[in-house]
Amino acid sequence: MLTVFEWTPVVLAEWTDEIRPLLTHDGNAALWPSERVDRVSLSRMDSQFVAIRDSLGLDKNLDFHSLRRSYVTHLIENGWDPLFVQQQAGHEHASTTAIYTCVSSDFRTRVLRQALGRTMKSALAEGGNR
């Protein structure tokens, strides 16, 4: 999994090497174990996310799954190959990845200008050959 922030691998290594072993028993492969069950449930992560979101006064439409959509969008906006992004998200079809992608208007404008610039350059080059 590609990490977006430089500090992410360091934090994850510290978690997996130093903290996680204190919370799990032999044979438990869960990355996020719980002291009561083998792994933290999705409903628990969702409820914690909602509590943090609300305490920060963020939009109520922001949900835990928004982090996944944001990851896909950041990769696309930073120029990663769409097939790589699709594979990172674990999507079978590029159309599913496209649904996840919510690029900014600045990104759309930049991509459109680049495409128009290439078209104009090509048209001017062809016109000079006639």
Image (spheres, helix red, strand yellow):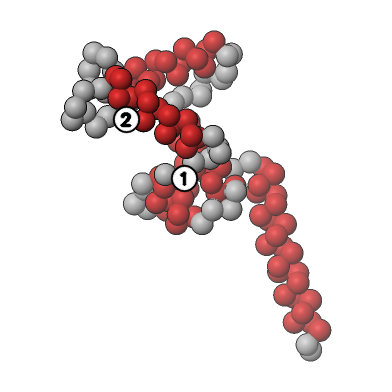
x, y percentage for residue 123?
74, 75
68, 7: nearer the viewer: 7
- Which residue type carries mark 2? Leu
x, y percentage for residue 47?
39, 15
Q: Residue reaching furthest left?
A: 27
The label number, if any, that marks residue 2 in the structure image: 1
Q: Residue reaching furthest right?
A: 128
Figure check: 16 above or below 45? below
Residue under label 2, please give it. Answer: 31
Which quadrant is home to the C terminus?
bottom right
x, y percentage for residue 74?
56, 42
Which quadrant is home to the N terminus?
top left
126, 47: nearer the viewer: 47
Q: How far is mark 1 from mark 2, CA to CA?
A: 17 Å
Query: Which badge, 1 or 2, is on the more N-terminal residue?
Result: 1
Badge 1 vs badge 2, beta-carbon distance below 8 Å: no
19, 37: nearer the viewer: 19
- Which residue type carries mark 1? Leu
Left or right of 95? Residue 33 is left
Left or right of 57? Residue 82 is left
